[in-house]
């Protein structure tokens, strides 16, 4: 539904968000009408010179009524808090089978990449009725990925991954905005989300220029940047091997345990001395400033592929 007040509603999250908005609006209208009506009523009834009774209230008014409306509003507020937070929190986690898209923001454009390696600039093609997970990072400053039709907005930060997801429910082209002031061309950092049906998406994906898929690309980077010198299966150097690493729990030398997820792999490339795996010397140099975000994404995809974690590839 689209109106003067609302952009078109084109995702499951948008329906839910609008629902919450309208219910809160309804509560507010009822309360405003009640309060204004009582103000009007009392100003007329108790105006100067009126003959209305002004003695003490009957006991039922000063006790039962008081307790009644206080607890009614308290429970109303608690209910709203529970309802809104539970629906918003459950919307944070992408379903397991979600299609994975990588987004890299920079001054001033959006670069998106599909799991088979297809890339787009200031555009993103997605299939309808399919959960789509966005894994986003920025090459420079903070940006924010904002799609009003999906009621979706998530900051995109340098040096860190943020995730969000959506399930489009309408075919069409929707606005993508940057919603965080990021420099002189911020207002022009826009794009288009193109929602097509599933067959059209498969055809579109197949028609993209032959690019290596992310994991393949990562394998090339792995050799070109010298990672393979220490981390390949055949290396004589005592460095953690990467087969089966992704998703596993890693024991660190300081006793902590972490899960080898995207953030851990990224940190290990850029800040290798922070989380040193138990049993290894902190000898790896930092690759900050050497690897681009695109290379980190493909390296991560490569490391994932070594764990047979490729359920999202097309
Ligand atoms: Cu990017 Cu504003």
Image: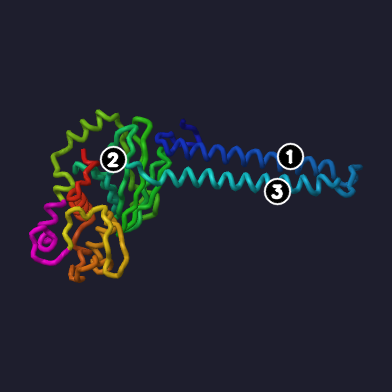
Question: Is the residue marked by circle 1 packed among few (<14), some (14-19), or many (20+) residues within 10 Å?
Answer: few
Q: What is the x, y in percent for residue 91?
A: 42, 43
Q: In whole angstroms, how far apart are the C-alphas of marks 3 and 2?
A: 48 Å
Q: In whole angstroms, how far apart are the C-alphas of marks 3 and 1?
A: 19 Å
**In the rendered view, does 81 fall on the left or right side of 289?**
right
Answer with the quarter of the image where residue 207 lies.
top left
Q: Is residue 177 visible?
A: no
**In the rendered view, does 101 fall on the left or right side of 145?**
left
> Label 3: which residue?
70
Q: Which residues are magenta?
A: 218-239
Of labels 3 and 2, earlier in sequence is 3
Q: Residue at x 49, y 37 (%)?
A: 18
Image mark for residue 37 = 1
Q: Nearer the viewer, mark 1 or mark 2?
A: 2
Name the secondary structure under disc 3: helix
Q: Residue at x 29, y 57 (%)?
A: 259
Answer with the quarter of the image where residue 168 lies.
top left
> Label 2: which residue?
99
- Above or below for 245 versus 43: below
- Above or below for 79 versus 295: above
**In the rendered view, does 210 fall on the left or right side of 253?**
left
Name the secondary structure under disc 2: strand
């Amino acid at each position: 539904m689209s109106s003067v007040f609302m952009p078109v509603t084109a995702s499951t999250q948008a329906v839910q968000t609008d629902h919450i908005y309208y219910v809160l609006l309804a509560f507010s209208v009822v309360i405003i009408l009640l309060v204004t009506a009582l103000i009007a009523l009392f100003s007329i009834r108790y105006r100067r010179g009126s003959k209305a009774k002004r003695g003490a209230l009957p006991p039922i008014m000063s006790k039962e009524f008081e307790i009644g409306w206080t607890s009614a509003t308290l429970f109303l507020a608690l209910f709203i808090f529970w309802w809104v937070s539970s629906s918003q929190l459950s919307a944070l986690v992408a379903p397991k089978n979600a299609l994975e898209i990588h987004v890299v923001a920079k001054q001033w454009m959006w670069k998106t990449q599909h799991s088979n390696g297809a890339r787009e600039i200031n555009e993103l093609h997605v299939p309808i009725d399919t959960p789509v997970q966005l894994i986003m990072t920025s090459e420079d400053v903070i940006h924010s990925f904002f799609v009003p039709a999906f009621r979706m907005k998530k900051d995109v930060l340098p040096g860190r991954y943020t995730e969000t997801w959506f399930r489009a429910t309408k075919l069409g082209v929707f606005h993508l905005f940057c919603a965080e002031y990021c420099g002189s061309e911020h207002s022009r950092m826009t794009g288009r989300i193109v929602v097509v049906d599933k067959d059209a998406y498969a055809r579109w994906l197949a028609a993209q220029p032959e690019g290596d898929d992310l994991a393949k690309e990562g394998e090339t980077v792995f050799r070109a940047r010298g990672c393979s010198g220490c981390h390949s299966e055949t290396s004589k150097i005592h460095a953690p091997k990467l087969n089966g690493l992704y998703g596993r729990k890693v024991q660190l030398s300081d006793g902590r345990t972490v899960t080898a997820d995207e953030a851990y792999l990224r940190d290990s490339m850029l800040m290798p001395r922070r989380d040193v795996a138990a049993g290894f010397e902190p000898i790896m140099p930092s690759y900050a400033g050497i690897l681009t975000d695109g290379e980190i994404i493909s390296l991560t995809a490569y490391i994932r592929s070594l764990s047979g974690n490729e359920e999202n590839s097309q």
